[in-house]
Amino acid sequence: MARIVCGGSLDRSNSSCWNGTIPWITAKDIRDARISDSLERITEFGLKESASNLLPVGSILVPASMILENVVINDVPVAINKDLKAIIVESPDLDRNYIQQFLLSKANSFELSGKEGMKNGYATEMLADIDIPLLPLEEQRRIALILDKADAICKKRRATLKLADSFLHSIFLDMFGDPVTNPKEWLTPSIAVQERYLQIHNKMVSIKEKLANELVQSNFLFNSLAASVFTSSEAA
């Protein structure tokens, strides 16, 4: 129904392997749910030298570390390095997005065992041993759509928190400068200025904490929803 493909490795000193047209996917490229480009590209010669394969569109890319926080599907043919595994779905009765969401729902379960699996090189065996509930295709698609929407909310809140953290830090430095180097050459501030400083600082901390709490709640709801859906599926 599906097969697992391992990534390869390339000699960086061989210029004939690099700067081609084939996306060379590494763990650094695994960020979003879908992937269509990479930081590096290889040549046809490099593909042959790497012992990797040109993966078809719709392959499911999984970190060899088995820490399943990022599982992506490729929208263009790609090759992968040794830090990744690929699941190539061959059965018309399996939905790729369903498998992707199921693996994401197991991220916490495999975090500890994944480190041991990476250490001993058992990632392929561990991946093959995961039991995925085989539901009717339409039910798989329905579940994948629900979880994909929930996951999108989590990712948006995660991005918002990161952006807010950077933005608030920039605003603070623009207003007051670095408190260590004191580039604005502030004199010893008055009590009123110190109080205003603390008010702004506390407001920034409050905003970041609120966003962080919302992210935690979103992640909890996603994990609870995924657990409920797949537990029900396994019971059925």
Image: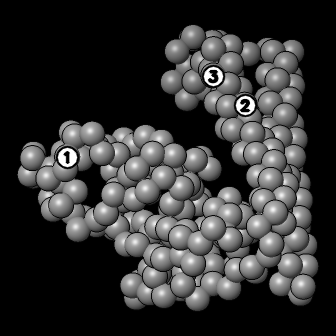
Disc 1 versus disc 2: distance between alpha carbons? 40 Å
Disc tally is 3
Of the 4 image quadrants, the one containing the N terminus is: bottom right
Q: Is residue 2 left or right of residue 78?
A: right
At a point 86% along the width and 78% down the height, the residue shown is 233
Q: Which of the marked residues, 1 or 2, is nearer the chain's N terminus? A: 1
**Where's residue 128, x and y in %?**
54, 84
The foreground one among 189 and 126 is 126
Which amino acid does the dot numbered 1 rest on? Thr
Q: Is residue 228 visible?
A: yes
**Where's residue 234, x and y in %?**
83, 84
Q: Which of the marked residues, 3 or 1, is nearer the chain's N terminus? A: 1
The disc label shown at residue 164, or none = 2
**Where's residue 41, x and y in %?**
28, 43
Disc 3 versus disc 2: distance between alpha carbons? 10 Å
The residue to which callout 3 is attached is: 170
Which amino acid does the dot numbered 2 rest on? Ala
In which quarter of the view is residue 94 placed? bottom right
Q: Do the numbered discs 3 and 2 sit on residues whose CB atoms are within 8 Å?
A: no
At a point 43% along the width and 56% down the height, the residue shown is 56
Q: What crowding class fits label 2: few (fewer than 14 Cα within 10 Å), some (14-19), or many (20 or more)?
A: some
Q: What crowding class fits label 3: few (fewer than 14 Cα within 10 Å), some (14-19), or many (20 or more)?
A: few
Q: Do the numbered discs 1 and 2 sit on residues whose CB atoms are within 8 Å?
A: no
Q: Is residue 58 left or right of residue 13?
A: right
Q: Secondary structure at mark 2?
A: helix
The foreground one among 211 and 151 is 151
Image position of 202 with respect to 214: above or below: above
Which amino acid does the dot numbered 3 rest on? Ser
**Where's residue 115, x and y in %?**
51, 79
In which quarter of the view is residue 194 placed? top right
The residue to which callout 1 is attached is: 43
Depth check, mark 3 against mark 1: the one in front is 1
